[in-house]
Amino acid sequence: MSLNEVTITKAIVKEFLKVFIEYSEVDAALVGGGPANLIASTYLARKGVKTALFEKKLSLGGGMWGGGMMFPRIVVQSEACRILDDFGIKYAEYEPGYYVANSIESVGKLISEACDAGVQVFNLMSVEDVMIRDDDAVMGLVINWTPVDMAGLHVDPLSISAKVVIDGTGHDAEVCRVVERKIPEAKFNVKGEKPMWADVGERVLLDTTKEVYPGLIVAGMAANAVAGGHRMGPVFGGMMLSGEKAAQIAFEKLGVG
């Protein structure tokens, strides 16, 4: 059978738009495709929560791909090994309490599990604003194509309605920055992360993973950036547990058992 270029084009556009329209209203919208949000979105979707993940770059995985300084290995503490087991990620003990995993395998399996769970991923999309209603709660996202922002074009965005939003955009805490900038009366302040101190940063991460504004949860490095916690580096146990906790908070807000 010969290939028809028009058929190929129609197939891509029609199938994408069908899903995009369906996911213009979701239960949970996650911004940033790093490890914390990949884990959070997987747990949400496994429970039947209608979940969309928006990533501004071409690929998911955040900083995990590069391991430590482009050595493709990550360190995970024993507390998070059960999450590695859940996602089928192999690891080996380095010394008591510390385990090493291949960063490339880790990202690949996190993405695979998210897709298998039913998470709809929209890459190359950036969040430029949030939707707020009279009850002063975040009710959704305002999105645009990342290349539009990169090219400095003035193109009006589109909107996604969501019952809960999780900011997992890493060091930049991009969604929280929008709230800080656009709702000054909320007196919401992003403190910014402190210098690297892996032990302290990891220990506080579960405390900083929380709902920071009605309808808005922070996870991963974004949580420490908002609260003024320390940077951790290529140790990812806290990031994984943060994703799990963010999903639990979302379950409570959505009334999911």
Image (cartoon, rainbow, N blue to C red):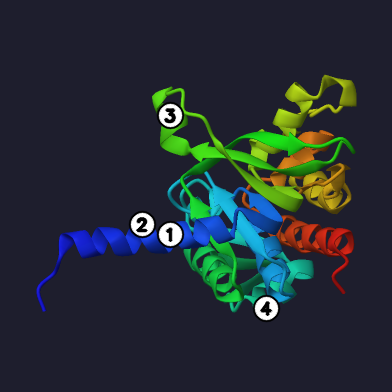
Q: Earlier in the sequence, mark 2 or mark 4?
A: 2
Of the numbered discs in the image, which one, if any, rests on residue 13? Answer: 2
Q: Quick check: 205 left or right of 69?
A: right
Q: Earlier in the sequence, mark 4 or mark 3?
A: 4
Which mark lies nearer to you, 2 or 4?
Answer: 2
The residue tagged 4 is 86
Q: Quick check: 168 left or right of 105?
A: right
Instruction: Give the alpha-carbon distance from disc 1 to disc 2, as whole Å.
Output: 5 Å
Q: Assess disc 4: are there few (<14), some (14-19) or many (≥20) residues with their C-alpha within 10 Å of its C-alpha.
A: few
Based on the displayed image, in which of its 4 quarters is residue 194 positioned?
Answer: top right
Based on the displayed image, in which of its 4 quarters is residue 192 positioned?
Answer: top right
Residue type beneath disc 3: Met
Residue 75 position in % (x across, y down): 64, 60
The residue tagged 1 is 16
Write the residue at 68% across / 65% down. Answer: 50
Q: Earlier in the sequence, mark 3 or mark 1?
A: 1
Q: Is residue 97 visible?
A: no
Instruction: Give the alpha-carbon distance from disc 3 to disc 2, as whole Å.
Output: 23 Å
Report the front residue among 52 and 35.
52
Q: Quick check: 119 left or right of 211?
A: left
